[in-house]
Every structure is written in structure tokens, then in C-alpha cells.
Amino acid sequence: MAASYDAIVIGSGPNALAAAITIARAGHSVLVREAQATIGGGMRSAALTLPGFTHDVCSAIHPLGVGSPFFQTLPLHEHGLEWVQPPAAAAHPLDDGSAVVIEQSLDSTATGLGEDGDAYRKLMRRLVANWNDLAPTLLGPPRLPKHPLMLAGFGLQALRPATGLARSVFRGEPARAAFAGMAAHSMLPLEKPGSAAFGLVLNALAHAVGWPFPRGGSQKIADALASYLHSLGGEILTGAPVTSLSELPPARVVLCDVTPRQLLALAGDRFTPAYRRLLSRYRYGMGVFKLDWALDGAIPWKAAGCARAATVHVGGTLDEIAESERAAWQGRHTEHPFLIVTQPSLFDSTRAPHGKHTGWAYCHVPLGSTVDVTEHIENQIERFAPGFRDRILARNVLTPAGLESRNPNIVGGDINGGAQDLGQLFLRPTWRLYSTSARGLYICSASTPPGGGVHGMCGYHAAQRALRELES
Ligand SMILES: Cc1cc2nc3c(=O)[nH]c(=O)nc-3n(C[C@H](O)[C@H](O)[C@H](O)COP(=O)(O)OP(=O)(O)OC[C@H]3O[C@@H](n4cnc5c(N)ncnc54)[C@H](O)[C@@H]3O)c2cc1C
């Protein structure tokens, strides 16, 4: 280790590594300090169940990773990252044994939606065609857009509640339910303005870049980012939690891949009272309860289409999904939670021994919930895949507290670094965005724009601000 650095980054999640790479690429020395023994934050994989089974502890599927304007500039394939594209992006089973399949082709998806095919095509066509122009604006801090008309067209739909949009655009339950499943990634009640944005963006990504995952597990993204950072001269120290900024070697700038609550604990004494107040008012959203399974065989979905996608949205109708999300937001638990299920081993033989499979699923629960919802989750899968339970060889349970103990950024189980409603979508965590009231100190986590997900864009934009200071 050097005696001093131009920049120190606290944490090694996607945003931390993106920030460190941006700074190292500009020719500055940088050290990453990670609390855990392994790097990656929300990109870790581990043997959570039985020997030979590799599970993604947090993130699993990466439309935002492959679609990230920043990651697209990095030679990650030269550092071991290989994206696996399943035949379809996502599937949504229904009680009649059918499934909506979101194919990579917009037209094929529309054809599968029958009576709502034209409406889906009309809703998505412009956004998909203009995705590359819009992505830097949608995945960045608020600023004057390069394509204001295009953005206005998106904004008019995106600012609506997901339920309102789905009911007014589509006539049939399948299309409404499938849109609700996409929008539920927002971790907001689907009646909230702005919840439609998440559904639109995730559908657009399905058609523009697909919903891939890394061969070998999400850890491979972390490893590739770290390998590239090392090639640029950056240093990484693991097993090195930072409890106070005063314990760091001298550095001209410090970037923190933490959420506002931790930032206050780390550096509260350096901030103005007004900034401290703003940070303490920052709101966290819902929590997550997650299960991983080692399975004796693939999940036996009734609908064959579900075996074509690595991601399956399980929750039935729009009304059921809306109730599930409303309940979690209001502090209630539901017996029929909406689930995001992934089954990467169907397309990646490195995840499980021959003939065996992995399963990964989570549902939203109230922030900090301590209720065990294992049975509710497994009942929901059994509903659309009878015989699922018989295939379970072993399971690992991650409660909100369990997730937070592995990564303090997952406050109360909130995987997005804070609620992403309109009040905190654009100006997060405060109007200062990546800057703080202390000179030389920045926040670069998912608690800054554009928010949760493995895309590195928060880190990239925070590093741009830090570079202005380093180079002034
Ligand atoms: C269960 C789950 C499923 C998810 N699924 C997906 C998905 O499929 N696709 C997707 O795109 N996103 C998904 N996400 C979200 C995604 O993982 C996060 O949004 C993303 O990882 C946030 O990145 P980050 O860099 O801001 O923080 P994190 O990835 O949370 O990293 C923060 C890092 O900082 C370290 N740290 C914190 N405090 C300190 C300290 N004081 N000293 C040193 N180190 C510290 C932590 O140990 C951690 O390694 C999921 C998250 C979870 C939990």
C-alpha cells in the first residue's frame, strides 16, 4: 500500500468499482477499501447450499449491466466476463397454465400478447428504437436532456402509476399482469406516480439489450471490474471496514459507496447541520426476503414458456401484484407475495452439478421485517410449478437482517439504497447529489442517481465530480 492516494473509495460494490476505474483511467492513484473478505457488494456469488452449487447472494440478472453506458466502455470480456443471453428475457405464468413471454424481439412479444399486441408495440416501439440515445439521460443525474422531445414522450407515460398505465393501455389480463410484474421492480406501490417508469425501462431493456447474466455468477462482474482496475494500477484492500474517515491514509478525495445512514456515522462531524438534517430525513423503502435453493431438477413450470427465460415473475394478476406491493409498503405481509424468481442454471452449467439446478427468489416485505415468509414464497412457486417442493435438496434463507449483516448498505433489507419514489428518484440523497457539504467527500452508492441496480452509473457520475476537484 502507498502512503497516500489521490482518491480512496469506501466499499467495492459496482458503484465503488466504477468510481475507482473512472479515477484510475484519468491517471490518478486510487485505493478501494472493502469491509468484507470478498469484493463485489451486491455482485457476490457463493456456495450458499450444497457443495457444487453456486448461488448469487444478491443480484442475478443484468439488463442494466449490459445496457450501462459506462460498462459498455470497459473491456470486461478481456477480464473474464461472459454474458449469457437466455432465449427470452422474462416470463410471467398465469393460473390457466399459460405464460406471457417477454422475448428479445418486440414483435414476437407483441404477437404473443394477442389482443394487446398492437398496444404493446405502440407503447414500446419508440423507447426501444431510441434506447441508446435515451440511456445516458435516464441512467444519469438530472440535467438538460440532449433529446428533449424523445424524453418528453417517455416522461408522459413514465410518470404515471403502473396500474393506471396498464389498465388504460391494455385490455387483457395477461398484458396487464406482465406489465405489473415488470413495474414491481420499482419496489413501490403500483398506484404511485412514477412506478410505470420501471416497467417501461425494464421492458425496453429486454428488447434493446436482453436480460443476460454472467456465466459463473454475478461475482464474475465484480472480478472483471477488479481485474480491470488492477490493470490500471488501482489497489483493493479487503477485510478492511472503515469506521471513521480519520483511519484512512491521506487522500485528496474520498468517495463513499454507502447509504446516507452510514455516511452520517462515518463523517457526520464533517458536515454542516443543514446537510446532516437532509441526510437524516432520507427514506428507505421496502425490504427483501430471499431464498436460494439447490434443486434435484429444473423448476417444473406448468407453462413451457417459463423455461425459456432466466427470470420468471410469479404473482398472478395485476390486482394480486398491486396488493402484494401495497402491503409491503404499508408494513403488512401477504400470503400471496409477488416473487422475482431466477433459474440461471438452465442456461449455465457451471452453477450446479450435472442434472441439478439452482433457484433464487425474493419477495418484497416491510422494511426490517422479521417474519419468515419461506412458506408463502414456496406456495406461490408451487401454484405455477406443481412438484417444485419435491425437487428441493437444500435451501438458504436470507432475511432483511441477514442481507444487511452481509452488506450494511442493505438497510432493513432495502436493496435499492433507499426508496425510489418521485421524491427521491431525481434528487437523491439530497439536492447536492454526489457531492456533500464537506470538500473532498462524495457519496457514490445506489443512494445517488440513477439508483439501484448493477450498472455502475452512480459511481461513474460521482467520480466525474471528484475528478473536477482533483484536476482543478
Ligand atoms: C437480493 C438482491 C437481489 C438483487 N437483484 C438484482 C438484480 O438481479 N439485478 C440488478 O441489477 N441489481 C440487483 N440488486 C441490486 C444491486 O445489487 C444493488 O443495487 C447494487 O449492488 C448497489 O451497488 P452499490 O455499489 O451502490 O452498493 P453495494 O453493491 O451494496 O456495495 C456496497 C459495498 O460497500 C461495502 N461497505 C459498506 N460500508 C463499508 C465500510 N464502512 N467500509 C468498507 N466497506 C463498506 C459493503 O460491504 C459492500 O461490499 C439486488 C440486490 C439484492 C440485495
Image (tube, rainbow, N blue to C red):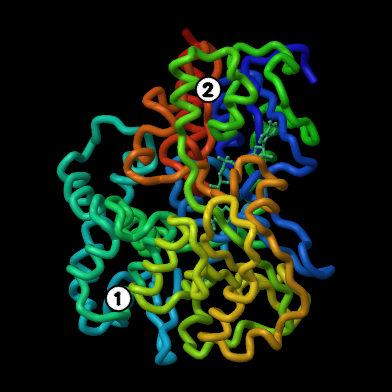
Residue 360 image label: none
Quarter of the rendered image showing ligand 1: top right
Q: Give coordinates of residue 169: x percent, y percent.
A: 19, 69
Q: Which three-letter amino acid code belongs to the residue tagged 2?
A: Tyr
Check disc 1 and give the amino acid type. Answer: Ala
Q: Residue at x 49, y 37 (%)?
A: 447
Provide the secondary structure element on which disc 1 rests. helix
Q: Is residue 262 above or below residue 452?
A: above
263 left or right of 166 in image: right
Q: Quadrant of residue 170?
A: bottom left
Left or right relative to 142: residue 470: right
Dot label at residue 442: 2
Give above or below for 216 relative to 455. below
- Residue 288 is situated, as x and y percent measured from the top left of the image, at 57, 57
Residue 317: quarter of image:
bottom left
Quarter of the image containing the N terminus? top right
Crowd rating for badge 1 (residues with CA inside 10 Å; few <14, some 14–19, many 20+): many
Q: Where in the figure is residue 4, as x and y percent of width and height?
A: 72, 12
Q: Is residue 38 visible?
A: yes
The kind of secondary structure element at disc 2 is: strand
Are the residues tagged 2 and 1 within 8 Å (C-beta)? no
Residue 137 image-quadrant placement: top left
**Residue visible at 70% across and 72% down in the picture:** 293
Using the image as rendered, state which of residue 416 and residue 301 is in the foreground.
416
Q: Is residue 138 above or below residue 118?
A: above
Residue in the image at 53% along x and 14% along y? 271
**Numbered mark located on residue 175 in the image:** 1
- Apparent side of residue 148 relative to residue 22 in the rendered image (left or right): left
Comes first in the chain, label 2 or label 1: 1
Is 129 or 119 nearer to us in this picture? 119
Residue 71 is at least partly visible in this image: no
